[in-house]
Amino acid sequence: MLEPVLSINHLQVSIRSRDGSMNEVTKDVTLELRDHEFVSVVGPSGSGKTTLLRAASGLRMPSGGEVLFEGRPVTEVPKGMAIVFQEYNKSLFPWLTIGKNVAIGAKEYPQPERVTRVEEALEQVGLKGFSTRYPWELSGGMQQRAALARAMVSNPKVLMMDEPFASVDALTRNHLEDVVQRLWAESNFSALMVTHDVGEAVYLSDRVFVLSARPSTILAEIKIDLPRPRSHLETKQMHRFVELQAEVLERVEEAGRESVGLPDDL
Amino acid sequence: MTSTQNVATAEQKSRFYSFSLGWLGLLALILLWQLAAILINKTIFPSFTTSIVAALHLITGPIFETDILPSIERTLEGFLISAVIGIAVGMLVGHYKSARSWTTSVFDFLRSLPTPLLVPVAVVIFGLNGHMVVATIVSGAIWPILINTANGTSTIEPTMIDTAKTYGLKGRSLFLRVVLPAASPQIFAGLRIALSVSLVIMVVAEMLGGGSGIGYFIANAQQSFNINGSYGGVIILAALGWIFDTSFLMLERRILSWQRGTVGGSANA
Ligand SMILES: Nc1ncnc2c1ncn2[C@@H]1O[C@H](COP(=O)(O)OP(=O)(O)O)[C@@H](O)[C@H]1O
Ligand SMILES: [Mg+2]
């Protein structure tokens, strides 16, 4: 079998809290992301999804375990990995136009190829002609699409997404999900998305992992055998979709029940 | 788009009003000065018009090259040195938590030293000259810049730094291309304070031992009862302060023009 693009092995992350004590956020997470696969990790808010994603992408040193990207240990964000953050309004640089923001992802390419790449990426996410606008001139959904364009323009092997649709309204979310689905289908990157939204995880993924409450471990792995391409109208009405969604939801609720009674040091 | 245009016009209107109100206030002050001068003995308190004439005299005379220009140069030099050091150190201190903890008390101590007390020290090191004035300016003007820069840097959204690292911006390019622009609103606030502080310290330092300059000239004029001359010097200082501040604001508005729409509303989903 092909070597996985990204493997997370027994990842453990502890964070020093303000009083100096160590707070174990991620206890033991192991998962693999195979070539051109779409994998989601679902967990309730505060279960350590962002922490997991940051450690898996080299933005934070894990306290235990290892992360391999194309077989090599990850110590900083590797070339070939792009990240889309939940807070698009803090992720786009407000002093740069949309075009220049996207160009940051394209700095590997020499001019004038860079300009063409940026224009293409903007067109891919439906932002053709917005290159000279500033982020604040765009709606939230458009800003997140710009962030997607910046990720896509670097032609990544792995796209990491931290609740990429959590901060937009429901209709925009459906639209953005389909933008991501189309980009993933048209390109050959693998996607790892963390989210608290079960429906969204099932709708987009090949496999869904359920995260336990903090300190988090993987509770379950559920294979999503829905046909592709998927659409909100048809896929979500399928019996199989409803079944899978219920299965994931059940495991997530188990995770929630387990955490009841545990002290919460938030 | 229409709403942004409305905001812009409202902003322009209020700017216009505060602008004209400012001028009205200034006019009132000048009238008061003129009135007071008529009531008080003119030889110890020259009127506004007399002072203006004296100032024009100074500007067109030899004093311009021997004292006014050197003062401007020292002020700008001190300000620029403060800006470079203050911004660089401020970004490092603000970015690295570990640096912040051990520098805070040192900086708090240093910046609480009153500037006039530093003049004799600077005189011993540099002598009675322009270098002493510049050094004294730096010792005072660096703090508002450093502290504002450190504050602006430490409050940058972590997501922004994560984004920078994701796209391989690290080391110097992280600081120059992300930290510097992200903290620039606060940096500019600090720079503006530092510019007026530079002007004040320039005068004080020159009065206490500059060997030349507007401060030196004013101190001399006062001691030799050249009352009109000293008031002319004060008018020149006020004009310089106004020119510096106005030019600075124009530059700031240009450089921070991207900020226009971001204040208080970038998260309109
Ligand atoms: N920088 C940090 N400093 C201290 N504690 C943190 C930090 N980041 C995260 N945590 C802790 O980790 C927990 C999980 O956070 P996070 O990974 O953001 O969860 P999620 O993304 O699932 O909502 C938080 O509840 C918090 O207690
Ligand atoms: Mg999170």
Image (cartoon, coloured by chain):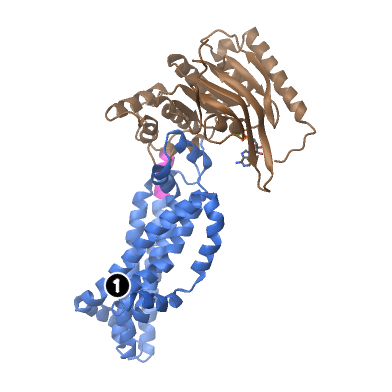
Amino acid bearing label 1: Ser
SS type, badge 1:
helix
Name the residue that disc number 1 marks: B71
Chain of the residue under the numbered disc 1 shown in the image: B
Residue B9 included in the magenta stretch of the image: yes
* Image coordinates for residue A108, horizontal then vertical, percent: 35, 30
Which residue is at a point 26% across and 74% down the rendered structure image?
A: B68
Q: Say if B18 sits above or below A189 in the image.
A: below
* Image coordinates for residue A52, horizontal then vertical, percent: 60, 30
Q: Say if A146 sits above or below A223 in the image.
A: below
Magenta stretch, main secondary structure class: helix
Q: Do we see residue A60 in this rendering?
A: yes
Please name whichever residue, B128 or A100, is drawn nearer the observer in this view of the structure.
Answer: B128
Q: Do we see residue B266 in this rendering?
A: no
Chain in brown in the render? A
Which residue is at a point 45% across and 30% down the rendered structure image?
A: A147
Residue A200 included in the magenta stretch of the image: no
* Image coordinates for residue B249, horizontal then vertical, percent: 36, 58
Chain in blue in the render? B
Q: Say if B247 sits above or below B206 in the image.
A: above
Classify residue B219 by image quadrant: bottom left
Circle 1: is it few (<14), some (14-19), or many (20+) Cα within 10 Å?
A: many
Which residue is at a point 64% across and 14% down the rendered structure image?
A: A222
Please name whichever residue, B96 or A85, is drawn nearer the observer in this view of the structure.
Answer: B96
- Please state, as top left, top right, bottom left or bottom right, where the N terminus of chain B lies in the image: top left
First to last magenta residue range: B1-10
